[in-house]
């Protein structure tokens, strides 16, 4: 008679699996590495690794004169170049006490709001790709290309514009600018509605984004989140309203606010922001009158000794520029408060207990640009 002795099964202790996402992963939206630890399909810990794109832009500013520094700000948030240029120029103008001509102010507003729409259209397209939809990126890039074509006509460049200058703008608008803007705003208005109808209420899109990557208003503020990502959590904070710069206090526009702080809210706040940007552009175009485009400033700027901090509402959030001047033609120190870098701090919170398949969706909803994260 053969007998079999049964031994109790020894269950090994479960261990978390470490997974590297990036730095070559296409959905990290740049050279960015995200290390995640998973238990089954749930993320238990996440650790962002930045710095792969670091060029030392802030240090480079110390060796350039003030006019040359603008080109370095073009390369921080390279999706919203004009908003970056404006942030630096506002800081220098504040230090020098400059008064900007009204025509230049309106040109700045029109171009920066167009840049906001172009930036959000890029987000719209690639966010659709992150979730598995191909058509949205075709719609988004169609609208973005229309804006880029106008930028090329005005500034001479599609991306690195070097157009906004301390005291105003580089040169006046083309003769056919008004006609082109009428056509463009009509096209963008229809395009935004088409993009909204295509993706926002799609059943699969809602399933992948509703209730995913939630962050409440208190936590969002604690992590330093700003811009659309903060407003999606229900916090009505927009630098254009709370601390108006330029002539933004002269315009009537709304501030879109989310309710749940999830991926869908972060997406849809940006869709609504594009509509509000069109509203601002329409008002600025009606107010655009002939006149000077530059204040009377020296070609080689020498701001007085002192320090200054200026804030703007870039497409990604609260962009702050701190400058220390020693009275020479080069800044003694430049420090940038980059919204993408601050928003990235909240990623660990958003990823906790999420499914590993949602990591790309949550990261994409923050809409980071690695050029300003690493600087």
Image: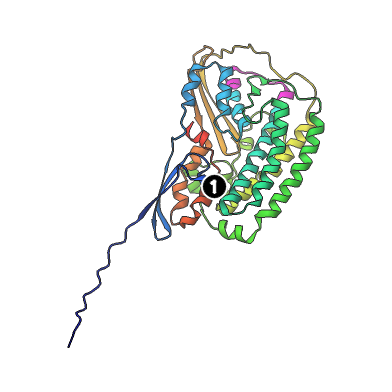
Does residue 282 appear left or right of residue 159 in this picture?
right
Q: Residues within 10 Å of mark 1 (few under 14, many from 20)?
A: many
Q: Judge whether 91 appears above or below 255 on screen.
A: above
Judge whether residue 259 can be spotted in this image: no
Q: Is residue 35 above or below residue 98?
A: below
Residue 210 position by quadrant: bottom right
Label 1 sits on a secondary structure element that is helix
Residue 212 in percent (x, y) is at: 52, 56
Segment tinted magenta in the rendering: 92-106
What secondary structure do most residues of the magenta stretch adopt?
helix
Q: Residue at x 77, y 25 (%)?
A: 174
Magenta highlight on residue 103: yes
Q: Position of residue 156 (x, y in %)?
A: 69, 25
Given residues 373 and 258, the one toward you in this image is 373
> Residue 243 colored magenta?
no
Tag 1 residue? 364
* Name of the residue lying farthest toward the front: 1
Quick one: quadrant of the N terminus?
Answer: bottom left
Residue 29 showing in the rendered view:
yes
Q: Residue at x 69, y 51 (%)?
A: 196
């Amino acid at each position: 008679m053969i007998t079999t002795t049964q031994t109790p099964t020894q269950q090994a202790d479960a261990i978390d699996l470490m997974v590297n996402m990036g730095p070559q992963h296409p959905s990290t939206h740049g050279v960015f590495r995200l290390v995640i630890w998973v238990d089954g399909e749930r993320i238990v810990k996440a650790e962002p690794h930045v710095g792969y794109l670091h060029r030392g832009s802030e240090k480079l500013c110390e060796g350039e004169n003030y006019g040359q520094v603008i080109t370095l700000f073009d390369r921080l948030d390279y999706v919203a170049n004009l908003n970056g240029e404006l942030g630096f120029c506002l800081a220098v103008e504040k230090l020098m006490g400059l008064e900007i001509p009204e025509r230049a102010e309106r040109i700045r507003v029109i171009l920066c709001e167009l840049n906001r729409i172009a930036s959000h259209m890029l987000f719209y397209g690639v966010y659709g790709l992150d979730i598995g939809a191909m058509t949205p990126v075709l719609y988004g890039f169609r609208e973005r290309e229309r804006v880029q074509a106008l930028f090329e006509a005005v500034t001479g460049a599609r991306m690195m514009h070097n157009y906004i200058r301390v005291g105003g703008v580089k040169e006046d608008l083309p003769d056919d600018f008004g006609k082109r803007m009428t056509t463009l705003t009509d096209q963008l208005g229809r395009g935004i509605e088409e993009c909204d109808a295509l993706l926002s209420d799609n059943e699969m899109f809602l399933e992948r984004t509703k209730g995913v990557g939630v962050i409440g208003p208190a936590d969002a503020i604690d992590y330093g989140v700003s811009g659309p990502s903060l407003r999606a959590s229900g916090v009505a904070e927009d630098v254009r309203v709370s601390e108006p710069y330029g002539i933004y206090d002269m315009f009537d526009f709304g501030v879109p606010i989310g309710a749940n702080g999830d991926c869908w809210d972060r997406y849809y706040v940006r869709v609504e922001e594009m509509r509000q940007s069109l509203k601002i552009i329409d008002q600025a175009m009606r107010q655009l009158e002939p006149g000077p485009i530059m204040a009377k400033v020296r070609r080689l700027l020498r701001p007085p000794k002192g320090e200054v901090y200026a804030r703007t509402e870039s497409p990604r959030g609260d962009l702050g520029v701190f400058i220390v001047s020693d009275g020479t033609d080069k800044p003694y120190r430049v420090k940038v408060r980059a919204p993408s870098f601050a928003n990235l701090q909240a990623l660990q919170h958003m990823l906790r207990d999420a499914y590993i398949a949602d990591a790309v969706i949550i990261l994409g909803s923050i809409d980071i640009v690695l050029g300003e994260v690493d600087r």
